Structures are given as C-alpha cells and as structure tokens.
C-alpha cells in the first residue's frame, strides 16, 4: 500500500472510497495544517515550474491559488483581505506587468 503522508483536497477520500480501496486519513491541528499547506505550496509551485504549455500552467496556477485561499483563512484572514493588500502594494510600488528587469543600482 503506497504511503503518501501529504495534505490532499477535501474530496479525495470520497473519490478513493468510490474505487473500493482502503485508506487512512487524519484531521490536522491548525499548526500542522499550516505546515502542510506551506509544503503543498512548494509542491504546486514546482509543478507549475515544470509545465510546458498554457493549459497545464493555468491548471497549476489554479492549484496555487487554492493554496493561497486556504493559507489566508488559516491565518484568520480572507482572500479578499489578501487581494486588498495586493492592490494597495501595487498602487504604491507597482505590479509586474511592465516586465522591468533591474540590472544594477549605483552605490553612493
């Protein structure tokens, strides 16, 4: 029996159950949950970095966004609050749309 020891989406046990396979799960405490969400963020980012086409890239970005939603909630916030902070930061410092690559800054 393969051992996964990783955070999975909420409906995965239901999906496995429909196959008739045996499995085991546990509900994480909040500190464990945040740790596992952080690991999952790295996993999803790595999957995004290894995509080779638009469809796969967008799918992996959706997975990353799901993790961001869960992380915001786990910190007692919301995606709306995160989005508001993002907008404020973009207004003050800009976004990344202009594709600016900083090479160097002269020392005084």
Image (cartoon, rainbow, N blue to C red):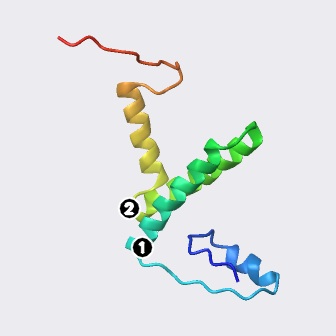
On the rendered structure, is 18 left or right of 35? right
2 or 1: mark nearer the eye: 1
Instruction: Provide the residue designation for mark 2.
Output: 75
Mark 1 crowdedness (10 Å alpha carbons): few <14, some 14-19, many ≥20: few
Asked where in the image residue 31 lies, by quadrant, the reply is: bottom left
* In the foreground, 1 or 16: 1
On-image quarter of the C terminus: top left
> Could you classify mark 2 by the number of other residues whose Cα lies within 10 Å: few (under 14), some (14-19), or many (20 or more)?
few
Q: Is 40 positioned to the left or the right of 77 in the image?
A: right
Q: Nearer the viewer, residue 40 or 94?
A: 40
**Mark 1 — residue?**
32
Q: Quadrant of residue 50?
A: top right
Across and down, in percent, residue 47 comes to 64, 50
Query: Who's the residue at 52% across and 53% down the image?
Result: 42
Please say if 12 is above or below 102. Answer: below
Q: Which of pointers 2 and 1 lies earlier in the amino acid sequence?
A: 1
Tally the marks. Answer: 2
Residue 89 horizontal/vertical position (percent): 37, 33
Which mark, by number, is residue 14? none
Q: Secondary structure at mark 2?
A: loop
Image position of 58 with respect to 2: above or below: above
Q: What is the x, y in percent for residue 57? A: 69, 42
């Amino acid at each position: 029996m393969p051992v996964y020891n990783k955070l999975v989406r909420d409906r995965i046990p239901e999906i496995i159950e429909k196959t008739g396979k045996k499995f085991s799960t546990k509900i994480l405490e909040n500190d464990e949950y945040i740790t596992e969400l952080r690991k999952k963020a790295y996993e999803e980012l790595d999957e995004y970095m290894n995509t080779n086409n638009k469809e796969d890239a967008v799918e992996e970005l959706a997975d990353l966004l799901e993790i961001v939603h869960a992380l915001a909630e786990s910190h007692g916030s919301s995606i709306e609050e995160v989005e508001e902070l993002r907008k404020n930061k973009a207004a003050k410092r800009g976004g990344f749309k202009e594709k600016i690559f900083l090479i160097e800054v002269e020392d005084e």
